[in-house]
Image (tube, helix red, strand yellow):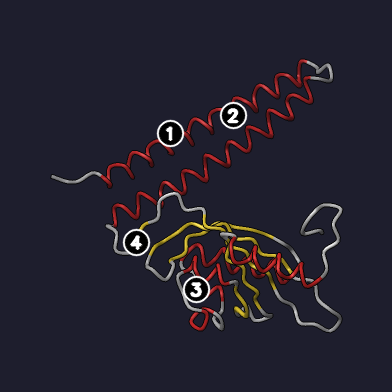
Amino acid sequence: MSILLGDLHIDAAALETVIGTVARRADLCVKVLDQEGVIRAVNPRGLDLLQVQRDEFCGNVWTDLWDGESQQRAIQAVQQGFSGVANSFTGTFQTGDGVVRSWVIEVVPLELQEGGKPSLLVISSDVTSRPYTMDASPDAIASLEALFEANKAALHNLNNIVSMTAGAARILSRQPAADKIELLSQHLHECSLKCNEAIARLQSAVEAVEGTQKPKG
């Protein structure tokens, strides 16, 4: 896979400068885990995002730094990665400044030279819409967590609707029989119900979050 596309040949030294510059400026935390799941390398920009120093970050088992359900997802992602399967997940992670943020994590097995030990490339992207600190009120934290879950449900159902409508369009373009049209109608109706439920949950979660932000008098 090419890093840059075009008709200009870039030598290895120049390409290293390109990659290094991107690594410093991109809002990504990039890590390499060894065969034990220990963090062996991290990009400088990643340390800035996490608000930690290299010495206190590298050398830790990466999955030990997560908590709760997010930790279980991290463990599963690492297991899949060492099985040769690239995968991703979302989770919440507290940075060094005490702020809880939402992340999209991609875990990619690294190609090995002959006789090399397995390792993983882990890329974290901060997708937080509204961060909160660990000393926030329990009501505020619960409301934000409910909002995250409602958002995930809404996105899941929207993805289903997109897939269903695309499939329906293909079937309807092939002179469908009446039984196929009836089946499509049933599936679309079920999807609409799920979407309405997800929208209601999302609206309720947003209102709950807004309620925690209002001053109490």
Q: What is the three-letter code of the residue carrying label 4?
A: Thr
Quarter location, residue 9: bottom right
Q: Which residue is mark 4?
A: 133
Q: Which mark is residue 45?
A: none
Q: Nearer the viewer, mark 2 or mark 1?
A: 1
Structural distance between the alpha carbons of marks 4 and 2: 39 Å
Q: Nearer the viewer, mark 1 or mark 4?
A: 4
Image position of 22 with respect to 117: above or below: above
In primary-sequence order, the first of circles 3 and 1 is 3
Q: Which mark is residue 65?
A: 3
In primary-sequence order, the first of circles 4 and 2 is 4
Closer to us: 130 or 155: 130
Q: Nearer the viewer, mark 3 or mark 2?
A: 3
Q: As drawn, is 2 to the left or to the right of 166?
A: right
Residue occupying image coordinates x 38% and y 50% = 144
Q: Which residue is mark 2?
A: 190
Q: Which residue is mark 1?
A: 200
Q: Position of residue 15 (x, y in %)?
A: 76, 67
Disc 2: CA contacts within 10 A as few (<14), some (14-19) or many (>=20): few
